Amino acid sequence: MFPALLPTYNRADVAFVRGEGSYLFAEDGTRYLDFGSGVAVNSFGHAHPRLAAALSEQAQRLWHTSNVFRVPGQEKLAEKLIAGSFADTVFFTNSGAEANELAFKMARRYHHVSGHPEKFRIISFEGAFHGRTLATIAAGGQEKYLEGFGPKVEGFDQLAVRDNFGAADLAALKAMIGPETAALVIEPVQGEGGVRVVPGEFLRALRRLCDEQGLLLILDEVQTGAGRSGKFFAHEWAGIAPDIMAIAKGIGGGFPVGATLATAEAAKGMTAGTHGSTYGGNPLAMAVANTVTEMLLAPGFLDQVNDTANYLSQQLGALAAAHPGIFGEVRGQGLLVGIRMKVPNSDFAALARAGGLVVMTAGDNVVRLLPPLNVSREEVREAIAILDRTAAALEPQKAAAQ
């Protein structure tokens, strides 16, 4: 469509030029209810006054100095993240892929300085998505992302999930761990993989296994963190703590920012000169992310997220019952919700968008709903009405095809 752009995206032919709260506006003025949030990025919707003011004020003072010098905004945000999590230390990045890259380096370096340089392999799980760099596609293990980019980066093993993260998968994982294994990496909810929620018991079993085997537990909370699950971080639902965690997306509320959080022990190998980033933690990103974090942790806000999530889940359950030929299982956690479709998910998403609702797709033929965390019940009802009309429009087509 636009030959000047590298054609790696299969873009919808819609260009949004303005956003306001939970709504987007296209070039022709058409309004869309946004239940994609830029793939779980716009935590507080579009053009939120507090976030716009934070960015504008910082932009008029200072944009960039690099990490050669102290960045007060980093120090302030690190304190907030540490106070609200398991972590003792934080490194700021520009994206989730970068945060995961550091998590992998940190795990390898930990064993190197602990006297076990042979431990460098990291086990991930089928259906995972950890980014698009060479290392993160190796960790994700999905052939569609690996094809043509070989040889695959060495040091990543993937467990085939056959028991929905149950006892058989745990037994297979134990058998896979060897003398070179350094860490496990997992998303508490596989977003791109189909909004598959990893059971809390499985996460607790991973924590015990890592402790028993001397491994590090890495959590990829790029999509599930920053309140998306109804907790500040999704692993809190399981009552565990990782050794290392990658975050991004929602913590910036729309501005590019990521971070790797870790315990002091897990990070002990990361000394001066072992890692760096030119733009990571720049003053603009820190101004926005500090404000986002304050808003997320404001008293009662996450309770509101959970209340809205429960309401959305109830409404989707009723919708699925009303259209059993279109909708299958409703799954997810908090405001990270998936509906497994009985029609092609891309067809459904395109028709929903034509009806005024932006949704995302995911693996396992899932349509993903990722509304802003401050979405209203009225907006939820509006989305349900559009989903209802979309399903009704597709039912005759499905019946004719059978």
Image (tube, grey):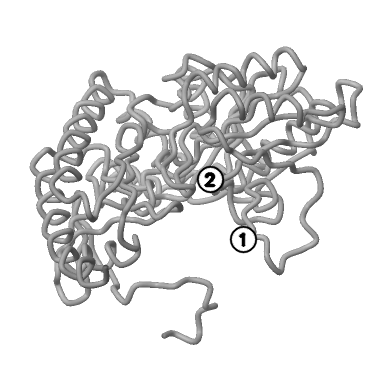
Which residue is at the far front? 402
Going by the numbered disc 2, the residue's amino acid type is Asn
Q: Residues within 10 Å of mark 1 (few under 14, many from 20)?
A: some
- Give the CA separation, mark 2 to mark 1: 30 Å
Please give the name of the residue rendered at 27% of the width and 63% of the height, measured from the top-left corner: 348
Q: Secondary structure at mark 2?
A: loop
Q: Residues within 10 Å of mark 2 (few under 14, many from 20)?
A: many
Across and down, in percent, residue 43 comes to 32, 42
Q: Which residue is mark 2?
A: 282
Q: Which residue is mark 1?
A: 145
Q: Is tag 2's residue or tag 1's residue first in the polypeptide sequence?
A: 1
Can you say whether 184 is above or below 17 in the image? above
Across and down, in percent, residue 57 comes to 34, 46
Q: Secondary structure at mark 1?
A: helix
Residue 370 relative to residue 138: left or right: left
Can you tell which quarter of the image residue 334 is in? top left
